[in-house]
Image (tube, rainbow, N blue to C red):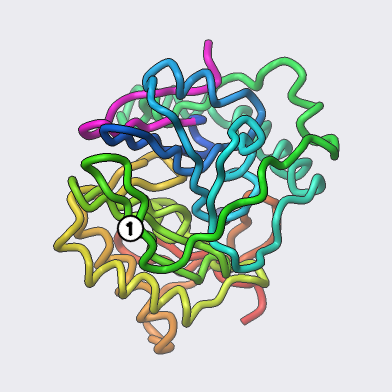
Amino acid sequence: MSWFHVRPVARDVWLVAEPSHVNSWLVAGRDRAVLVDTGLGIVPIRPVVEAVCDLPVDVVNTHAHLDHVGGNAEFSRVAASPFPTSGVAASERASYLRWMREVLDAAAAYRDLDARYFHLLSADSDPRPLPDGVERWVEPGPPSGPVPAPLHDGDTIDLGGRTLTVLHTPGHSPDSLCLLDDRDGVLFAGDTVNTGPIYAQAPECDLPAFAASTARLAALSGDVSLVAMSHFGRGVAEPRYLHDVAVAFDRLVTGDPTVEVRPARDCEGDAVREAVFDQCSVYLPAVP
Ligand SMILES: [Zn+2]
């Protein structure tokens, strides 16, 4: 079984999922294509991309976290926000590998319950066995890929009959960006919008910036047909979801005392607080 699950979700837009871990997105115009993020780098992503698209492919990273840049070295042209971020440490890979094993251990029981009662799992989200040699992934050393060309807010990427506009959306990380497909309204949201817990707990996260960025996306939702996200069981959402996320962040930055907050653990096993809303949740630092 392939490590990846690939399927079209819109006209010339493909989900390239590492199910239950991270989604990369391929978007093609007439002349060229962009791969939005390159995944974990556990298994080469480029052959998977070339199997569905024969155009030249450049990479845009939504941010430099390890699960978004893993396959950068397979490509010759990469672009990203120039704002500094925490980057990729081998120790993070080790803790993420522990998390992947934890997910797989939980999956069998979850599949049984899902098949009987809930019916949410699909090939997009059902975790796949770890590939042989995955331990090598945690060793330091593999090249991180080309130095990214800088992308700034408002820059455009012309794919031929289709333009992607760069939206600098700090909050999850200083370098987070989204891409808006001006032709068909697909918003590639990176980790700024997700349908599981939205990660705002790391030291480099900035809650007021997150609120401003999600408010900006909500204001653009009239131009959005589909939100394409990086994580969790639902990789796409309707534009209305941008409002739900923006309202959640607004309630957090304005100190709404009615927000339910409970203890949780993130994928690195670290204690966090989880603010729970009807349609989403947000991970916050363990200590306010
Ligand atoms: Zn991230």
- Magenta span of residues: 1-17
Query: Residue at the spot x=40%, y=23% of the render?
Result: 6
Q: Horizontal and vertical percent for residue 169?
A: 44, 68
Q: Main secondary structure of the magenta part?
A: strand
Please check the rendered image and state whether residue 2 is part of the magenta-colored stretch, yes or no. yes
Mark 1 highlights which residue? 165
Dot 1: element: strand
Quarter of the render that holds ligand 1? bottom right
Q: Is residue 81 left or right of residue 53?
A: right
**Residue type beneath disc 1:** Thr
State whether residue 194 is above or below residue 133.
below
Q: Horizontal and vertical percent for residue 112?
A: 44, 22
Task: Name the quadrant of the C terminus.
Answer: bottom right
Q: Horizontal and vertical percent for residue 75?
A: 59, 33
State whether residue 209 is above or below residue 126.
below
Foreground of the two, 166 or 9? 166
Foreground of the two, 57 or 200? 57
Query: Residue at the spot x=36%, y=80% of the render?
Result: 250
State whether residue 141 is above or below residue 247.
above
